[in-house]
Image (spheres, rainbow, N blue to C red):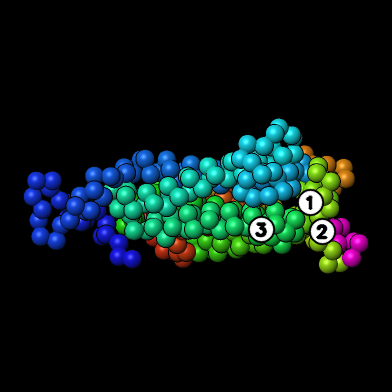
Amino acid sequence: MRLPAEGTGPLCKQETLTPGCHNGSLMRERFTVSPRTYAYVAQAAMAILVLIVFSGAAVRTSGSGLGCPDWPDCRGTFLPAFEKHTWMEYSNRLLSSVVGVVCIAAGLLAFQRRPFRRDIVRPALVLPVGVLAEGALGAAAVAFDLEWPVVIAHYLLSLSLLLAATLIVWRLRTEPDDPGPANDQWVVRGARALTVYGGLIIVLGTLATAAGPHAGGAGTGDVVERLSAFGPHTLVKLIKLHGHLAAAMGVGAVALWFFARLRHATADLQRTLTALCVLLAVQGALGLWQYHTQLPATIVWVHSSIPAVLWALLVWNWLAAGRPVPAEQLAGAGSSRAVTAV
């Protein structure tokens, strides 16, 4: 697909058509989206992709995963009778429809934004394609009675879409020719390592949840197979492994926060690292709470939902770190700015 150049393209007058200009071009140019409007759409996509993770986790921890045993309708109708577990699941499906509308809008309107931004097209296209895949995985989760590999794939795909939406929102903050932030090379490497490590911790957390008691079928009396790779002690082993590695992540985040301040990192990166440290502390406290109170559903719901916010922050952390620059070069640039100011 050939894309129009940034801010260019022939305009067609209604009265006379110039050579190479067609009515289709006229229609496309009439329907355009302003930068502010598209930014709102992208931000809405980012927010609702976080919200759907909270909603899906609520369905699972309330035992309502098979409240609608068929798909796409529910119990043979699109307006099922009111019953707690049925409507817990059906409400999540309705919210998923809103997610689909917003993500498809974000994907299609990227082509109608004026001036056109080539750098947002690829992540924007991920959104409509991804929500279609999410619908297929949602149907598969019901068809396969909430088998844990399908549920994990459903969860991780949501985080992949959130990555794309976060990338769009980040890029819209500046012009395409902006060089972007730059930080000390070791700060940048640390920030990127933290993001990758955090992603692995989130994946490990989904495995621990897959071995836990909240499979999604308790409210409807359905028995759902759990992850049991290490026999009867699988859950305890995965919780401890996840907990210890997550604690190491928290320590690493705090160390990086101090190091970033010492190296005079950009304000954006310092704010992101601060938010990460606070959220990791909250998540750690919730993890200990749920472990020592026999995994109550409400605490597990919050603990399994927060990674959506955490992942958005981790992606933002990578982007805010920017380009790696040697410390001497940064110091030289700072001195030049100071001399210029004088």
Does residue 273 appear in this view? no
**First-in-chain label (3 vs 2):** 3
Q: Quadrant of residue 177?
A: bottom left
x and y percent of residue 102 in the render? 47, 45
Nearer to me, 280 or 34 = 34
Q: Residues within 10 Å of mark 2 (few under 14, many from 20)?
A: some
Q: Main secondary structure of the magenta part?
A: helix
Q: Residues within 10 Å of mark 3 (few under 14, many from 20)?
A: some
Q: Amino acid at mark 2?
A: Glu
Q: Amino acid at mark 1?
A: Ala
**First-in-chain label (1 vs 3):** 3
Q: Which residue is painted at 49% across and 51% down in the image? A: 165
Q: CA distance from mark 1 to mark 3?
A: 15 Å
| Dot label at residue 225 | 2
Q: Amino acid at mark 3?
A: Ala
Q: Residues within 10 Å of mark 1 (few under 14, many from 20)?
A: many
| Dot label at residue 110 | none
Q: CA distance from mark 1 to mark 2?
A: 8 Å
Question: Contact, CB < 8 Å: mark 3 with mark 2?
Answer: no
x and y percent of residue 73 in the render? 63, 45
| Dot label at residue 215 | 1
Magenta span: 231-239
- Mark 3 highlights which residue? 140
Q: Which residue is painted at 40% across and 43% down in the image? A: 39
